[in-house]
């Protein structure tokens, strides 16, 4: 077993001051409207603070590297969970917003490319009125 | 000396308190084993009630409401009270310290505590049953689970508590594997069952807290009206599924990885051949454990999650097939040109290979988004899941029980009856669940108490064979217990299958209270059948 690490009081005081400072930063940024970036910034500051506590107050920096690995793994799994869940929440409903898939599927079938364009009542439509029809091939 | 050899963990010390307060990993393992088997029978009984209800359309035996309770309890009991705790808790506890040459696990008191935490959680589950059941399905999906008037709270509380037992067992095993190995027993000389337990433990300690968080969030919403999953309160119901499956998909690997470990022990021993691709099997265990964390969304293809994440989840899901395939081919190659003996454990291992391969491959079908949208929530999923969990895990568990039974209890069961029962399990299982693939393909939805006329034939086949399956499992387990009652003892020094791991070569059957009379000295690797001759010794 490695020897017990003795941390100088100065280090503790510096870390404690940093934590207080960062708490101030958290309060300060909460008054600035950064949109959805607010939460990212708040979480970032909180993560830095938690890491300072773990590394210095809990001696993780000088401890067996296996414990550090475990700590980093827990952050990694948390990151995986949040990131992949956000692939859902941030892109939910994208089916209707994508112009490629917004039109009815049968309109894009090759068969329709050979037909003259009509409106919903079957009357011929002027091609220039709709930019969507530029790629249609009419002979 | 003769007095010393007669002393074993079963008869020393004596008295009920010596069992209830034991710190011996083998006794704790046995307590897990018996409680696990008890819940297995309870869950099995519920399964048979369902099958007999489904023998014909309409409500013949139970009402729709009771049916909802029965399938929920069947799932919850089998998963949370039997499969997840049973193999690591029972076989893992009994074998891990023996396999690494230790006197006990790293934290024996924590080990006993984790058994009592499990029991305490099980009490809540029992209360749920007595108090009228729970009808949400074992997944407790919102929004229904936040509104249902059934016993969602006691059941989820029970699962929350059992989760802690799982975490503590995982922690204990990791510490034991890191710190308690005898000198010379390096990582690549560990039996593969130990690697499997290591992978399982990693998943237990990293995934289970998320289940606890999920259950707490569910209760916060129910009691305090905090909007987490309910859209009316600003929540997101699909988020519940993300939380739940972030635990429950890795939990599938908590259930199947120990089974892989058992098969990796049974096949080389009963083929008397060195395992093929030791490092591949060991690392495939760890890679399955890791990839298992990235694929949870394949349970949610019809939940309304974004198309982008569906593509990502579907793509990553295919990766699970690679390490799993590595294992299957390694086991098959281990048997190639080996001296395969058709003992009961080997029958179960062969059944496992067949059934798990079907279960795994149909999992790849379901991993494809386009196909899953049609098959989701049909009997195809029910069949796939049971091929993996029952055909895989429970068959391997039965194989492991038969393999280590003479070691754990110093008695030998009737091998002919055991073989017949194993055959009955194999045929009964396929008869029960193969028709369910067809039912699913034809559109029979899961969790329904009744069905259209067109499904009658396949449902009645399934019900008939489920009876055979139930009887076969009952015979298999009773055959084991009968050997104990009949005291069909094996010689304490016997090694009936010719195993090479420490539990076979260095300790008596049943083992000494302190595992080894002197610290074992490692003489060979766990599967060195090409270098050392180990005799099969089996004397009455």
Image (cartoon, rainbow, N blue to C red):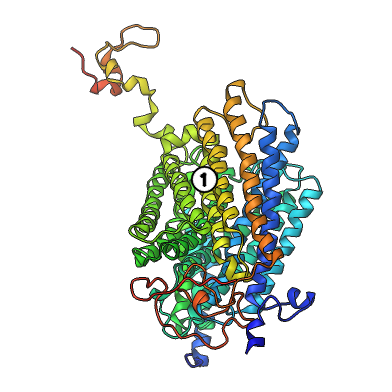
Q: Name the spot of residue B23 as percent of width and height, x first.
A: 68, 78
Q: Name the spot of residue B238 as percent of width and height, x first.
A: 56, 44
Identify which residue, B383 or B147, lies in the foreground: B383
Identify which residue, B110 or B267, lies in the foreground: B267
Q: Residue furthest left?
A: A139
Q: Is residue B236 left or right of residue B520?
A: right
Q: Is residue A109 above or below residue B174?
A: above
The quadrant holding residue B66 is top right
Q: Is residue B320 above or below residue A64?
A: above
Quick one: quadrant of the C terminus of chain B?
Answer: bottom right
Q: Is residue B144 left or right of residue B353?
A: right
Give the number of marks.
1
Please give the name of the residue rendered at 38% of the width and 25% of the height, measured from the top-left corner. A103
Please give the name of the residue rendered at 39% of the width and 61% of the height, measured from the top-left corner. B339
Q: Is residue B62 above or below residue B484?
A: above
Q: Element under label 1?
A: helix
Q: Is residue B267 left or right of residue B14?
A: left
Q: Is residue B323 above or below residue B192?
A: above
Please give the name of the residue rendered at 37% of the width and 58% of the height, measured from the top-left corner. B335
Protein chain holding label 1: B
Q: Name the spot of residue B509 as percent of width and height, x first.
A: 59, 75
Please give the name of the residue rendered at 57% of the width and 65% of the height, measured from the top-left corner. B88
Q: Which residue is mark 1?
A: B387
Identify which residue, B284 or A36, lies in the foreground: B284
Quick one: quadrant of the N terminus of chain B?
Answer: bottom right
Q: Name the spot of residue B115 as percent of width and height, x first.
A: 68, 68
Q: Is residue B274 visible?
A: yes
Q: Residue furthest front?
A: B540
Task: Estimate how packed mark 1 is, as few (under 14), some (14 to 19) or many (20 or more) residues with alpha carbons within 10 Å.
Answer: many
Identify which residue, B11 or B193, lies in the foreground: B11
Q: Is residue B242 visible?
A: no
């Amino acid at each position: 077993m490695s020897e017990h690490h003795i941390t100088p009081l100065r280090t503790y005081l510096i870390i404690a001051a940093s934590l207080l400072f960062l708490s101030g930063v958290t309060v300060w940024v909460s008054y600035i409207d950064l949109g959805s970036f607010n939460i990212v910034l708040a979480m970032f500051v909180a993560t830095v603070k938690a890491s300072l506590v773990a590394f210095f107050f809990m001696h993780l920096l000088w401890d067996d590297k296996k414990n550090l690995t475990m700590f980093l793994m827990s952050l990694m799994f948390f990151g995986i969970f949040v990131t992949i869940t956000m692939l859902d929440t941030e892109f939910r409903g994208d089916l209707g917003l994508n112009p490629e898939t917004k039109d009815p599927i049968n309109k894009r079938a090759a068969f329709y490319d050979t037909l003259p364009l009509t409106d919903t009542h079957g009357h011929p439509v002027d091609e220039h009125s709709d930019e969507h029809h530029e790629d249609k091939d009419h002979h | 000396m003769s007095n010393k050899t007669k002393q074993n963990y079963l008869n020393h010390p004596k008295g009920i308190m010596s069992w209830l307060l034991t710190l011996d990993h083998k006794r704790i393992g046995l307590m897990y084993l018996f409680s696990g088997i008890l819940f297995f029978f309870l869950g099995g009984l519920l399964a048979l009630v369902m099958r007999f209800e489904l023998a014909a359309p309409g409500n013949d035996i139970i009402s729709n409401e009771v049916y909802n309770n029965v399938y929920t309890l069947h799932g919850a009991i089998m998963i949370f009270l039997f499969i997840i705790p049973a193999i690591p808790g029972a076989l893992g506890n009994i074998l891990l310290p023996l396999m690494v040459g230790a006197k006990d696990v790293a934290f024996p008191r924590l080990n006993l505590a984790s058994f009592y935490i499990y029991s305490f959680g099980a009490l809540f589950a029992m209360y749920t049953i007595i108090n009228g059941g729970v009808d949400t399905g074992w997944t407790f999906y919102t929004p229904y689970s936040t509104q249902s008037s059934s016993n969602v709270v006691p059941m989820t509380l029970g699962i929350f508590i059992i989760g802690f037992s799982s975490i503590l067992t995982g922690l204990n095993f990791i510490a034991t594997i890191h710190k308690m190995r005898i000198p010379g027993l390096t990582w690549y000389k560990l039996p593969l069952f130990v690697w499997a337990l290591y992978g399982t433990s990693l998943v237990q300690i990293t995934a289970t807290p998320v289940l606890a968080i999920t259950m707490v969030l569910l209760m916060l919403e129910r009691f305090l009206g905090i909007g987490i999953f309910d859209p009316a309160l600003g929540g997101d119901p699909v988020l519940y599924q993300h939380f739940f499956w972030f635990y429950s998909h890795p939990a599938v690997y908590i259930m199947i990885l120990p089974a892989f470990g058992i098969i990796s022990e049974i096949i080389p021993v009963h083929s008397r051949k060195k395992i093929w691709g030791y490092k591949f099997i060991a690392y495939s265990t760890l890679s399955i454990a890791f990839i298992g964390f990235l694929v949870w969304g394949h349970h949610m293809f019809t939940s309304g999650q974004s198309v982008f994440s569906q593509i990502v989840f579907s793509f990553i899901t295919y990766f699970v097939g690679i390490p799993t395939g590595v294992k299957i081919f390694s086991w098959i190659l281990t048997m190639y040109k080996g001296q395969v003996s058709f003992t009961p454990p080997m029958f179960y291992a062969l059944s496992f290979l067949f059934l798990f391969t079907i279960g795994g491959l149909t999992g790849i079908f379901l991993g494809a988004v386009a196909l899953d949208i049609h098959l989701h929530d049909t009997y195809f999923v029910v069949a796939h899941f049971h091929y993996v969990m029952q055909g895989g895990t429970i068959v391997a568990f039965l194989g492991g029980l038969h393999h280590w039974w003479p070691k754990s209890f110093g008695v030998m069961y009737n091998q002919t009856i055991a073989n017949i029962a194993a055959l009955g399990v194999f045929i009964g299982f396929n008869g029960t669940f193969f028709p369910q693939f067809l039912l699913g393909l034809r559109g029979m939805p899961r969790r329904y108490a009744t069905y259209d006329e067109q499904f009658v034939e396949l449902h009645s086949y399934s019900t008939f064979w489920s009876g055979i399956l139930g009887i076969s499992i009952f015979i298999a387990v009773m055959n084991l217990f009968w050997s104990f009652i009949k005291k069909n003892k094996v010689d304490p020094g016997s090694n009936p299958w010719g195993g090479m791991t420490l539990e076979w070569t260095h300790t008596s059957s049943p083992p000494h209270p302190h595992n080894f009379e002197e610290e074992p000295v490692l003489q060979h690797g766990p599967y060195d059948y090409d270098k050392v001759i180990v005799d099969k010794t089996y004397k009455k």
